[in-house]
Image (cartoon, grey):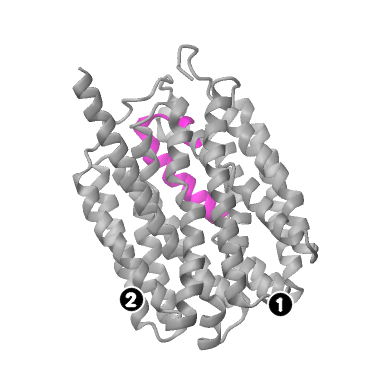
């Protein structure tokens, strides 16, 4: 008995480690472009709005691919689909070596978006079958640690390598681990769907038709969409803001922003997962509560970071990232817990489609458009408005969150 439990824990840990490592590579590959964007703009001249379209096209392909992938993942073994996705986006990243105009860069970005969607749309449901409801935020905090750490490494890798060997070099280096980790994933056992669920299966939680009238799912998803709008726009434009508006050298801007993303994101993601699970065992909608508090506190920090040029600017950027990323794990756990295992991959694919359609698929382009016609500070006002609406939706989401059974262990 003990031997069998130890074996299960071993495979659970292996799955979490491999999936988290792949997510690190995912975010490194995704954020390198933000670090080298001014260099790319010099080689392929174009407006801020035009280069914002790179991220828009990436997320458009990403979100259109997700529903199909989610449908397949609810019917076939998920690890094979995730493996194919990792290999596809890694191969597309290598295509940067032969990218010599803006159109080719756009095509390369499109293929990367398709590959990443086949991984990100499935992984949360895979992890949900390894951990019960009241432990999911902590497991997701490890997995989503890749967002701040991978993004930060993308800035640091891009800034360091691009200044020495050109902006294409970090893309080629970042592609190799994806191939290897994708193959290792083939040896991870597929968990039994719904084996860790304790909540009752209802038509609202367990059918595709019921999903559309599921208020717990939609308040969490729409709150996440507006958070994604703000985070996506800030990640794309913050190094450029520091370089252009505050006259910080680009290499220094990437280094500082990368290190702040690394520190603030690591602390916030781990703390958010722990707090979310703690609150979920004490209050209905505890995951939404922690997320809403994070968004509320992020708003003044963003405004201070953008409109204050003095000594408070960098601490405000740090706090803005901390409070925005505090909600990553609990908010994703709220989405997972709002539905049953039968439709979880499909539901998460709908979530991904929605959050990118309303979020970072067009926020970089919109912020670039505002910057072209006004200034970059006013572009960040759009992100601040999204944060305010997100907080309101998440406070409302507490009312609709499912109530965990009383006999669950905290």
Evaluate whether residue 68 shows in this view. no
Residue 247's disc is 1
**Label 1 to label 2, Cα distance in Å?**
33 Å
Instruction: Count all numbered tags in the image, as a single digit.
Output: 2
399 shown above or below 145: above
Sooner in the amino-acid sequence: mark 1 or mark 2: 2
Is the stretch drawn in magenta largely helix, strand or loop?
A: helix
Graded by Cα atoms within 10 Å as few (under 14), some (14 to 19) or many (20 or more), the crowding at tag 2 reads many
Evaluate whether residue 113 shows in this view. yes
Of all residues, the one furthest to the top in this rendering is 407
Q: Which residues are magenta?
A: 335-358
Q: Quadrant of residue 275?
A: top right
Query: Which residue does the image show at 32% across and 73% down from the upper left?
Result: 94
141 shown above or below 135: below
Residues tagged 1 and 2 counted as in contact (Cβ below 8 A)? no
The quarter of the rendered structure image containing the N terminus is top left
Q: Position of residue 34 (x, y in %)?
A: 53, 69
- Front disc: 1 or 2: 1
Query: Which residue does the image show at 29% across and 68% down from the upper left?
Result: 91
Q: Position of residue 204 (x, y in %)?
A: 47, 27
60 shown above or below 135: below
Judging by the rendered image, the residue that carries numbered circle 2 is 95
Q: Quadrant of residue 194?
A: top left
Query: Which residue does the image show at 40% across and 80% down from the upper left?
Result: 104
Q: Which secondary structure lies at badge 1?
A: loop
The question of residue 255 being in magenta is answered with: no
Q: Which secondary structure lies at badge 2?
A: helix
Q: Position of residue 286 (x, y in %)?
A: 59, 28
């Amino acid at each position: 008995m003990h031997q069998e439990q130890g074996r299960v824990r071993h495979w659970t840990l292996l799955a979490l480690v491999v999936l988290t490592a792949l997510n690190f590579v995912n975010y490194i590959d995704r954020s390198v472009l933000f670090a080298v964007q001014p260099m790319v703009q010099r080689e392929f001249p174009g407006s801020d709005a035009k280069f914002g379209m790179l991220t828009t096209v990436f997320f458009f392909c990403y979100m259109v691919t997700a529903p199909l992938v989610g449908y397949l993942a609810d019917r076939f073994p998920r690890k094979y689909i995730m493996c194919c996705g990792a290999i596809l986006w890694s191969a597309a990243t290598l295509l940067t070596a032969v990218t010599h105009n803006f159109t080719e860069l756009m095509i390369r970005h499109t293929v990367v978006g398709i590959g990443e969607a086949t991984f990100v749309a499935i992984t949360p449901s895979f992890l949900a079958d390894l951990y019960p409801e009241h432990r999911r935020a902590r497991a997701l905090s490890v997995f989503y640690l890749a967002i701040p750490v991978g993004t930060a490494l993308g800035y640091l890798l891009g800034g360091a390598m691009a200044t020495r060997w050109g902006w294409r070099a970090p893309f080629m280096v970042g592609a190799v681990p994806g191939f290897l980790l994708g193959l290792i994933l083939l040896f991870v056992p597929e968990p039994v769907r719904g084996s860790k669920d304790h909540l009752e299966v209802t038509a609202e939680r367990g059918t595709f038709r019921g999903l559309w009238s599921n208020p717990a799912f939609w308040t969490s998803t729409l709150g996440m969409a507006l958070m994604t709008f703000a985070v996506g726009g800030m990640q794309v434009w913050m190094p450029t803001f520091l370089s252009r508006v505050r006259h910080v050298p680009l290499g220094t801007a990437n280094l500082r922003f990368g290190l702040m993303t690394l520190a603030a994101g690591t602390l916030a993601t781990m703390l958010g997962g722990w707090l979310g699970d703690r609150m979920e065992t004490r209050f209905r909608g505890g995951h939404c509560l922690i997320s809403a508090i994070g968004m509320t506190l992020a708003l003044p920090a963003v405004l201070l970071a953008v409109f204050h040029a003095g000594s408070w600017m960098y601490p405000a950027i740090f706090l803005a990232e901390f409070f925005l990323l505090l909600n990553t794990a609990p908010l994703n756990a709220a989405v997972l817990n709002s539905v049953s295992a039968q439709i979880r991959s499909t539901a998460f694919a709908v979530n991904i489609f929605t959050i990118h359609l309303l979020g970072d698929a067009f926020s970089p382009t919109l912020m670039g458009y505002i910057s072209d016609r006004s200034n970059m500070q006013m572009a960040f006002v759009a992100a601040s408005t999204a944060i305010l609406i997100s907080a309101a939706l998440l406070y409302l989401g507490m009312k609709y969150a499912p109530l965990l059974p009383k006999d669950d262990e905290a």
